[in-house]
Image (spheres, rainbow, N blue to C red):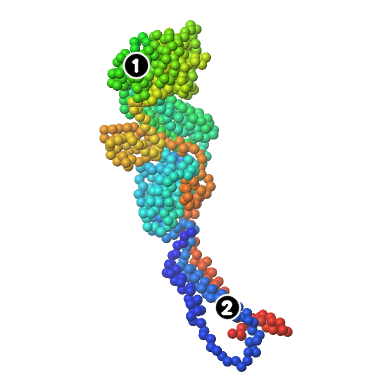
């Protein structure tokens, strides 16, 4: 509790309350001896009379001292502030501007509007000598706020009017550090921190590291803003599923929007998306509560460099978690080296590069011999090398080093596949001798999670179709190797595994219709092209952050960067890389520094759509900080209650009344005399008399 002394002169005079004690000890009447002829008049005096008189004197002395103390305290006019500070006050308003604060409070008012109105009310009721400041729970460089405490109440109220919700999540520790720093820099005696938030559980309901220690005498108040129930179910843009492996210029890519439903009931909405190539799409969604749905977005082919896609949801129950983008860096075209004669590979060259020069797939096909491998591999740096098992045996360790360095290797049976041949151990599989059947054996998917099937999944599992194999060399996968496709009887035809930085694919069928019907299926095109793109050795980059975060290691070697949005929320900033702020809202941002550039996608935090809030009298995110939690109901009533507490309780009448009571009690006791008990019939009876001294 804190007190405000409005007339401190009388408070300094409180030591005068000891004056009766001093008078008692130093100004007492001195006794003089007197001669009496007889003691017969003192025989009836009770021996306890002296002790009673002493107690009586001390009570009178105590009441006199207490009267002076209470009178001086009353004249000093103390005011009890009820724990809300006194004197010159410095108050910092921490306003939660996270995405959830854009939700409803009551009527048509958002939670953020209720927070800023309440904060304005507190500032408006502060005294002329008081200071105030504003701190945001999510850093927003687009909102101009005073960097330190200010006595200009109009400036503070204008700053509160500028605040709008972001797409990020609150950072309580960061906001408290800023608020405490502002208070320590000020000179006020009373310090207050007012937090206005809906106390969403994902941000405020867990203990966090780095909560700062409050300056001495700081009072922390948390004003909980109740959340109105949403009118309908909510969908969240939870992120993006990126294509496996490399992204190549001139090649279409499929990015999947992950749409989640954090509620318990089914929610509906509409997903829209667009990319920098002009492609657009729309899809109506219905997602069961507690589940997630993946929506494929086909991007237009682009040249080498940075590209982007931006998506947003509409017509669901909450908009603070509905937007986001992603930046994609496309690499140059890559090469595939086929070692051997052309007729050994069937339709593989056409599947890898349907058009000359790789304009459609981004893959150029070249042929070579085993003898050329040591010289061509370092120079060409192919993304894929395809060999027969005979050529693999002749290549020695050259191909093993190539795979471990990040290349992709495809091993085929070859033209002469009648004999069973051993494969090197690092290939991860054993290839049996050739088998044939005129009726054809059914081919099925054995590894639905394989990287090779990533481009043919459309939300309901792999689209593979009916495939028959007429000639095949069954494979036996080593331990830990992945079987991708095989026969109905369980034998494997295609084994894939990572070896070092690259992949090895050992296939037991040739890529010719005489071997199987697989080359006649659309899935074949996606499978073999994914073999060439399985490892990302070309350095393809994908950049995406959640609102409120800042990207790292984007522009190296440049001190000054320029940031500008190209899609989504408007944002523009220029400054040193080390001072780059977090990005508060969903957008696609172009970042340029010197001759380098990059594209970053910012998406809204999916945590903001989870309707769970902290209850009770303690906020876990504040750790051991002492704080008081109150619910904000009607904004006007809240402001009035804060004003009453800030005015405090004037204790002058109560203290003056107590002083008068002490004076009356002292007067009565001082004028009351005790006499010795009377003796009648040999029995002493106590009584009062005023004549014995």
- Is residue 468 placed above or below 218 in the rendered structure? above
Between 373 and 153, the one lying in front of the other is: 373
Q: Between marks 1 and 2, how big is the CA–CA gap?
A: 118 Å
The residue under label 1 is 395
Q: Is residue 215 left or right of residue 573?
A: right
Between 108 and 625, the one lying in front of the other is: 625
Looking at the rendered structure, the number of numbered marks drawn on it comes to: 2
Question: Can you name the residue that lies furthest to the right here?
Answer: 681
Between 170 and 133, the one lying in front of the other is: 170
Q: Is residue 625 left or right of residue 150?
A: right
Which class describes the residues within 10 Å of circle 2: few (<14), some (14-19), or many (20+)? few
Q: Position of residue 582 (x, y in %)?
A: 37, 40
Instruction: Name which of mark 1 and mark 2 comes first in the sequence.
Output: 2
Q: Position of residue 270 (x, y in %)?
A: 46, 29
Tell me the mark number nearer the camera, choosing from 1 and 2. 1
Please report the residue visible at 49 percent of the width from the left and 71 percent of the height from the top.
Answer: 69
The image quadrant that residue 680 belongs to is bottom right
Disc on res. 560: none
Residue 610 seen in this snapshot: yes
Please report the residue visible at 31 percent of the width from the left and 25 percent of the height from the top.
Answer: 304
The residue under label 2 is 54
Please report the residue visible at 51 percent of the width from the left and 67 percent of the height from the top.
Answer: 655
Question: Can you name the residue that lies furthest to the bottom here?
Answer: 37
Instruction: Check contact, mark 1 vs mark 2: CB within 8 A.
Output: no
């Amino acid at each position: 509790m804190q007190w405000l002394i409005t007339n401190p002169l009388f408070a300094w005079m409180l030591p005068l309350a000891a004056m009766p004690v001093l008078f008692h000890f130093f100004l007492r009447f001195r006794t003089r001896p007197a001669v009496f002829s007889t003691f017969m008049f003192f025989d009836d005096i009770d021996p306890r009379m002296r002790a009673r008189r002493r107690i009586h004197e001390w009570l009178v002395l105590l009441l006199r001292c207490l009267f002076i103390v209470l009178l001086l305290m009353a004249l000093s006019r103390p005011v009890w502030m009820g724990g809300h500070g006194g004197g010159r006050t410095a108050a910092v308003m921490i306003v939660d501007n996270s995405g959830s604060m854009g939700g409803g409070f009551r009527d048509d008012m958002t939670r953020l509007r209720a927070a800023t109105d309440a904060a304005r009310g507190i500032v408006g009721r502060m005294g002329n000598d008081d200071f105030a400041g504003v701190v945001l729970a999510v850093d927003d460089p687009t909102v101009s706020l005073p960097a330190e405490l200010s006595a200009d109440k109009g400036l503070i109220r204008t700053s509160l009017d500028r605040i709008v919700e972001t797409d990020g999540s609150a950072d309580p520790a960061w906001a408290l550090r800023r608020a405490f720093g502002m208070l320590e820099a000020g000179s006020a005696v009373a310090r207050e921190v007012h937090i206005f938030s809906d106390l969403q559980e994902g941000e405020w309901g867990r203990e966090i590291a780095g909560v700062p220690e409050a300056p001495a005498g700081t009072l922390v108040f948390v004003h909980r803003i109740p959340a109105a129930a949403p009118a309908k179910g909510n969908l969240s843009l939870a992120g993006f599923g990126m294509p496996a492996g490399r992204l190549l210029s001139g090649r279409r890519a499929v990015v999947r929007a992950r749409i989640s439903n954090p509620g318990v009931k089914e929610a509906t909405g509409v997903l829209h998306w667009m990319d920098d190539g002009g492609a657009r799409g729309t899809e109506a969604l219905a997602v069961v509560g507690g589940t997630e749905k993946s929506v494929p977005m086909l991007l237009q082919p682009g040249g080498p460099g940075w590209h982007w896609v931006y998506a947003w949801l509409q017509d669901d129950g909450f908009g603070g978690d509905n937007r986001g983008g992603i930046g994609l860096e496309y690499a140059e075209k890559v090469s595939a080296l086929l070692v051997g004669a052309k007729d050994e590979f069937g339709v593989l060259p056409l599947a890898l590069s349907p058009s000359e020069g790789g304009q459609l797939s981004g893959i150029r096909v070249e042929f070579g011999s085993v003898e050329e491998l040591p010289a061509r591999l370092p120079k060409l740096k192919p993304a894929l090398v395809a060999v027969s098992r005979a050529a693999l045996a002749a290549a020695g360790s050259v191909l093993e080093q190539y795979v471990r360095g990040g290349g992709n290797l495809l091993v085929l049976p070859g033209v002469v596949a009648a004999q069973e041949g051993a494969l090197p151990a690092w290939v991860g599989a054993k290839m049996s001798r050739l088998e044939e059947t005129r009726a054809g054996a059914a081919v099925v998917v054995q590894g639905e999670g394989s990287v090779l099937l990533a481009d043919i999944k459309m939300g309901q599992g792999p689209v593979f179709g009916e495939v028959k194999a007429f000639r095949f060399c069954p494979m036996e996968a080593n331990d830990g190797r992945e079987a991708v496709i095989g026969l109905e009887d369980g034998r494997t035809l295609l084994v894939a595994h990572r070896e070092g930085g690259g992949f090895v694919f050992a296939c037991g069928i040739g890529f010719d219709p005489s071997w199987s019907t697989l080359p006649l299926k659309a899935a074949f095109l996606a499978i073999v092209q994914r073999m060439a793109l399985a490892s990302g050795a070309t350095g393809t980059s994908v950049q995406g952050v959640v609102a409120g975060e800042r990207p790292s290691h984007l522009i190296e070697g440049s001190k000054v960067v320029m940031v500008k949005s190209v899609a989504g929320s408007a944002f523009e900033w220029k400054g040193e890389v080390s001072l780059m702020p977090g990005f508060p809202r969903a957008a696609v941002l172009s970042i340029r520094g010197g001759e380098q550039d990059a594209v970053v996608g910012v998406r809204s935090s999916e945590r903001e759509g989870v309707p769970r809030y902290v209850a009770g009298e303690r906020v876990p995110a504040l750790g051991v900080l002492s704080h008081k939690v109150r619910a904000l109901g009607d904004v006007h009533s809240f402001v009035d209650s804060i004003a009453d507490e800030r005015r405090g309780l004037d204790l002058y009448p109560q203290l003056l009344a107590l002083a008068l009571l002490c004076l009356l009690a002292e007067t009565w006791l001082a004028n009351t005399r005790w006499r010795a008990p009377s003796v009648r019939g040999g029995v002493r009876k106590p009584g009062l008399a005023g004549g014995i001294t």
